[in-house]
Image (cartoon, grey):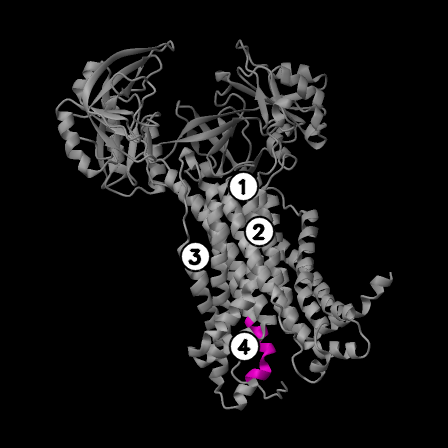
């Protein structure tokens, strides 16, 4: 209690000082509240997006007590509380799946239920046929309440009635319209709504039996009610092959010891890389806030220096002086943390509809993770306290006589800090090297933190060095550099804050772009970029003509070229063929390609007069390929560096009864064409004479579509048209590697975060410094400096803080950034290669663009005239 009473007066003084210096207090509140706001909003969005098993119960089982599903041939199954995590032993003999009556008997008297089946059908649209998910369940039954939300119309009440979701309705179906599936059955649309779990894909719901799903007998599902389904009942149904999602079990799960060992492996924790990144982000954010708020507390402590000196002169102790400054951290940190959490909840709520637009799954109910928010608020308060520690320590050690005489009371800096900074920076570099060589992500994260701390301690040395080089600078820039070096107590935290921000953004930027470089470098292209291919494995000549006509009609200007090859697929009642390419006399393991396969319809093409244009091979190889094919030889592709003048072609046949046999083999001359490792395509192109010797069927296997750029919408529409003509026909367009939305968002967030923090930190530090230096600037006016000179000094000061901080941060950020690229990309995609990609545009924007922009903003907004004040020092 005595300890608490000793804080009463400092807290009262801090509250009054905060009210008196409103501008500076608002700056501190913004700097503390913004990170808290951002983390709170992100946490709310993440928690709301993560639909737990409990939150998703009504979506998955409606109002039922349990969902029981069976799959043909599963045998005994083992499941976790949520059957998403399950495994099976497999059945030795195929047995009929249980029906609803069998499930009701197994669960005991009083159990009632309805059937629920799911499958896929082709729906005729204005363009052709669209694959559509369908469900067979009676939405009128109370057990199904919550599975599908019918927003207009009503649920299906007859076998020829269906409900469609908005994605299918957007393809031209309204209430009362007829909808026809591929087999000719027609339904009437009586309701429109949405599945409560997923969105973004066509779906229809009809009564049990409406789509004929049960006739396949591959799986069966039942929604049951009548009472809770216990864990013992779940395990009993597992023995018979039933997977059970029980409401009672999810809400009151059994001990982990009762969960089968076969599925415990699925409940793994967060991987070490994710933990390391989270720790790094939290620590870097804490350092950032401390450094940003530090100058404000330093200026506040300087404004209170005379009061603190009077306190010391009348018997106050250094501890009491420290408490006065630390109390400002408690007051402003607590208020900023609470304000940040409240505003973060509002921002999170406002952002959720935007996030929903980019998600194919419906988000969960608005989730406020109160334990997390308490920790986030504590983070904000801790950052404010840490930001006030150094100013409080300096204030308690100031020269009382000098302060009372009107002079600066700062003590001379110690040499120990630069030495310690050099050691920490060296240890950080060494740790990053060790982490890159295999010690892991935690080593790199720790090395990054040590490197940043070392850099912070070296900032004073850098400022002094820059000041010594300022002799030839213009007046305003020379003044700003030397003032920054002289008043290091307010400049060092500002420069270090900018440096820490840039270091974190550069490190994460290098990691993200290097990972993307690995993705792009190991992406396997099936066709030249921009090329399309229409395939159908059993089409007749007439069907190919119709498919070609459809492509020409839907894609004006496109060139459609037939592709011939070995007919590898076909009807299940017919044998299928495959041609293997080997070195003469070698085994089946001595292959030319790591992977064979082709989006062109066959892995073995047939041509007598050259390579198809859709094969991505060097132009220098085409003329020799024509000569080889006309001479009766084969053109073979390799990504293993194999070189030979003859190859052995071996024809394989798989019979409808499952047996396999080598049909024939032939040795022919060959031209070997090297291709990139990340390129998939046919393994060989051979002449018709060679195919005849191998006794394999040859025909049209695909159609190449070239000459125009095919948009995503055109690809979708053409796919429906082709499927409407032939259910086995499809279109594939090679677009090269496409970064997923998540990666693009991360890159944009990194750039925006770096820009906001740099601008905020530099502007805040600059205006605080200008406020602290009003006496010096007034002196400039007194000796004849023009009003624009003050604007120039202000802009120059912002440039110094931003440019020096960004340059230091970029250099230090390269250390963990380059290091983390090794564990991220080494051996990526089974390729022993290291990918390193530096986001130079991001680095240039941070180091050059933002400091110039900040200087411009400060120069335009700074006051050009100040009242004259007395300068005593």
Q: Which is in the foreground here, disc 4 or disc 2?
A: 4
Residue 27 position (above or below residue 38): below
Name the disc covering residue 842, or none: 3
Spatial CA span between label 1 and label 2: 20 Å
Magenta stretch secondary structure, dominant? helix
Q: Earlier in the sequence, mark 3 or mark 1?
A: 1
- The N terminus, quarter of image: bottom right
In the picture, residue 385 is in which quadrant? bottom right
Q: What residue is shown with label 4? A: 483
Mark 3–mark 2 distance (CA, rounded to whole Å): 19 Å
Comparing 727 with 532, the one in front is: 532
Name the quarter where the C terminus is drawn: bottom right
Q: Is residue 773 magenta?
A: yes
Which residue has dot 2 on it?
A: 281
Of callouts 3 and 2, the N-terminal one: 2
Rendered position, 743 above or below 673: below
Q: Residue at x 71, y 72 (%)?
A: 397
**SS class of the residue under badge 3?**
helix
Q: Is residue 216 left or right of residue 18?
A: left
Q: Which mark sits nearer the N-terminus, 4 or 1?
A: 1
Q: Nearer the viewer, residue 802 or 96?
A: 802
Note whether 31 is above or below 435 in the view shown: below
């Amino acid at each position: 209690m005595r300890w608490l009473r000793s804080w009463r007066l400092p807290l009262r003084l801090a509250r009054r000082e905060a009210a008196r210096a409103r501008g500076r207090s608002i700056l501190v509140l913004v700097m503390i509240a913004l990170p808290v706001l951002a983390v709170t909003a992100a946490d709310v969005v993440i928690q709301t997006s993560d639909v737990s098993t409990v939150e998703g119960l009504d979506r998955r089982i409606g109002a039922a007590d349990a969902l029981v599903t069976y799959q043909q041939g599963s045998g005994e199954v083992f499941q976790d509380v949520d059957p998403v995590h399950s495994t099976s032993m497999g059945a030795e003999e195929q047995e009929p799946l249980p029906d609803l009556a069998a499930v009701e008997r197994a669960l005991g008297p009083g159990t009632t239920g309805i059937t629920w089946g799911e499958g896929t059908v082709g729906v005729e649209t204005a363009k052709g046929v669209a694959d559509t998910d369908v469900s067979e369940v009676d939405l009128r039954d109370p057990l199904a309440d919550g599975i599908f939300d019918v927003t207009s119309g009503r649920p299906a009440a007859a076998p020829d009635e269906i409900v469609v979701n908005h994605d299918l309705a957007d393809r031209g179906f309204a209430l009362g319209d007829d909808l026809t599936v591929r087999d000719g059955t027609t339904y009437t649309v009586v309701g429109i709504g949405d599945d409560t779990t997923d969105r973004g894909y066509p779906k229809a719901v009809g009564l049990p039996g409406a789509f004929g799903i049960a006739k396949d007998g591959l799986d069966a599902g039942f929604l049951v009610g009548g009472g809770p389904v216990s864990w013992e009942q779940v395990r009993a149904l597992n023995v018979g092959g039933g997977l059970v999602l029980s409401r009672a079990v999810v809400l009151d799960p059994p001990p982990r010891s009762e969960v089968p060992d076969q599925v415990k492996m699925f409940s793994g924790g967060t991987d070490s890389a994710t933990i390391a990144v989270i720790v790094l982000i939290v620590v870097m954010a804490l350092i950032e806030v401390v450094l940003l708020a530090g100058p404000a507390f330093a200026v506040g402590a300087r404004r209170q220096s005379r009061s603190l000196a009077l306190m010391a002169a009348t018997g106050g102790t250094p501890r009491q002086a420290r408490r006065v400054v630390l109390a400002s951290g408690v007051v402003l940190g607590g208020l900023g943390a609470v304000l940040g959490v409240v505003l973060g909840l509002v921002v999170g709520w406002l952002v959720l509809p935007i996030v929903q637009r980019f998600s194919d799954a419906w988000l969960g109910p608005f989730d406020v993770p109160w334990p997390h928010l308490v920790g986030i608020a504590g983070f904000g308060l801790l950052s404010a306290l840490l930001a006030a520690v150094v100013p409080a320590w300096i204030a308690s050690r100031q020269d009382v006589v000098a302060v009372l005489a009107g002079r600066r009371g700062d003590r001379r800096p110690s040499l120990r800090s630069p030495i310690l900074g050099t050691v920490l920076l060296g240890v950080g570099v060494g740790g990053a090297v060790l982490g890159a060589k295999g010690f892991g992500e935690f080593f790199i994260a720790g090395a990054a933190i040590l490197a940043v701390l070392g850099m912070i301690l070296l900032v004073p040395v850098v400022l002094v060095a820059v000041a010594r080089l300022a002799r030839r600078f213009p007046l305003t820039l020379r003044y700003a550099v030397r003032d920054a070096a002289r008043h290091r107590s307010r400049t060092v935290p500002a420069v270090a804050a900018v440096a820490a921000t840039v270091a974190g953004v550069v490190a994460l930027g290098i990691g993200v772009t290097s990972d993307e470089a690995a993705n792009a470098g190991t992406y396997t292209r099936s066709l030249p970029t921009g090329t399309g291919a229409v395939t159908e494995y059993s089409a007749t000549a007439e069907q190919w003509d119709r498919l070609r006509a459809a492509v020409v009609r839907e894609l004006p200007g496109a060139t459609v070229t037939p592709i011939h090859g070995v007919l590898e697929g076909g009807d299940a009642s017919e044998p299928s063929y495959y041609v293997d390419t080997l070195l003469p006399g070698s085994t089946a393991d001595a292959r030319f390609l790591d992977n064979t396969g082709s989006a062109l319809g066959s892995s073995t093409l047939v041509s007598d007069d050259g390579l198809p244009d859709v094969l991505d091979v060097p132009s220098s190889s085409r003329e020799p390929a024509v000569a080889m094919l006309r001479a009766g030889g084969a053109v073979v592709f390799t990504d293993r560096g194999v070189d030979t003048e003859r190859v052995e072609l071996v024809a394989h046949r798989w019979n409808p009864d499952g047996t396999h046999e080598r049909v024939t083999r032939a040795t022919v001359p060959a031209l070997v064409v090297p291709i990139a490792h990340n390129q998939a395509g046919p393994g060989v192109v051979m002449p018709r004479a060679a195919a005849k010797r191998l006794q394999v069927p040859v025909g049209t296997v695909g159609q190449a579509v070239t000459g125009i750029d095919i948009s995503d919408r055109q690809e979708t529409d053409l796919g429906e048209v082709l499927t409407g003509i032939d259910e086995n026909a499809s279109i594939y367009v090679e677009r090269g590697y496409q970064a997923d939305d998540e990666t693009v968002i991360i890159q944009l967030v990194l750039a925006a975060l770096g820009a906001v923090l740099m601008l905020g930190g530099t502007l805040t530090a600059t205006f605080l410094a200008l406020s602290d230096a009003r006496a010096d600037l007034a002196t400039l006016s007194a000796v004849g400096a023009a009003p624009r000179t003050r604007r120039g000094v202000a802009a120059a000061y912002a440039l110094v803080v931003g440019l020096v901080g960004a340059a230091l941060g970029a250099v230090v950020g390269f250390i963990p950034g380059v290091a983390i690229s090794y564990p991220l990309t080494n051996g990526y995609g089974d390729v022993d290669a290291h990918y390193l990609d530096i986001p130079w545009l991001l680095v240039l924007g941070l180091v050059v663009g933002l400091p110039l922009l900040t200087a411009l903003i400060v120069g335009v907004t700074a006051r050009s005239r100040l009242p004259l004040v007395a300068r005593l020092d």
